[in-house]
Image (spheres, rainbow, N blue to C red):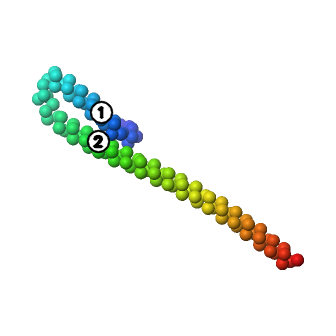
Amino acid sequence: MDFDAIADITVVDVYESAAGIGREFEHIIDVYGTDAIACLMPKVITVLEQLEALAQRNERESAQISDLQFTVEKLEAHKSAKSSERMKFERELETDRESWRLETKE
């Protein structure tokens, strides 16, 4: 079983699977009658509803993860910019100190 593919399942995938299962049920009903799937159909519907709920949750969580990744990238860029500013300030401060030392020696 490919768990990566399962993790990427969407609500649309569930609807497509449900449509395919529905077509198969119709074929079974045409050949054997409704009694052939009377007990099975409610169970399959319940499983499909549960799968749909999980797919919806997965899509929400994926969106949240993407938002959080964007926020982390933005914060890392901000941190890098602040670090660059600090290094620049420290260089300027050292230059000013060196100039002050030279002036005080003279």
**Horizontal and vertical percent for residue 79?**
58, 60
Classify the position of the N terminus by image quarter: top left
Q: Residues within 10 Å of mark 1 (few under 14, many from 20)?
A: few
Q: Nearer the viewer, residue 47 or 18?
A: 18
Give SS at disc 1: helix
Which amino acid is tagged 1?
Answer: Ser
Up-down relation of residue 52 to residue 16 (above or below): below
Residue name at image x 38 percent, y 49 percent:
61
Residue name at image x 54 percent, y 57 percent:
75
Tell me if 36 is positioned left or right of 91 in this view: left
Query: Quarter-wise, where is residue 17 in the image?
Result: top left
Residue 17: mark: 1
Q: Are marks 1 and 2 in contact (CB under 8 Å)?
A: yes
The answer to whether residue 4 is visible is yes
Which amino acid is tagged 2?
Answer: Leu
Give SS at disc 2: helix
Q: Residue furthest top?
A: 31
**Horizontal and vertical percent for residue 88?**
70, 63
Residue name at image x 21 percent, y 37 percent:
44
Tell me if 62 is positioned left or right of 40 in this view: right
The residue that mark 2 highlights is 51
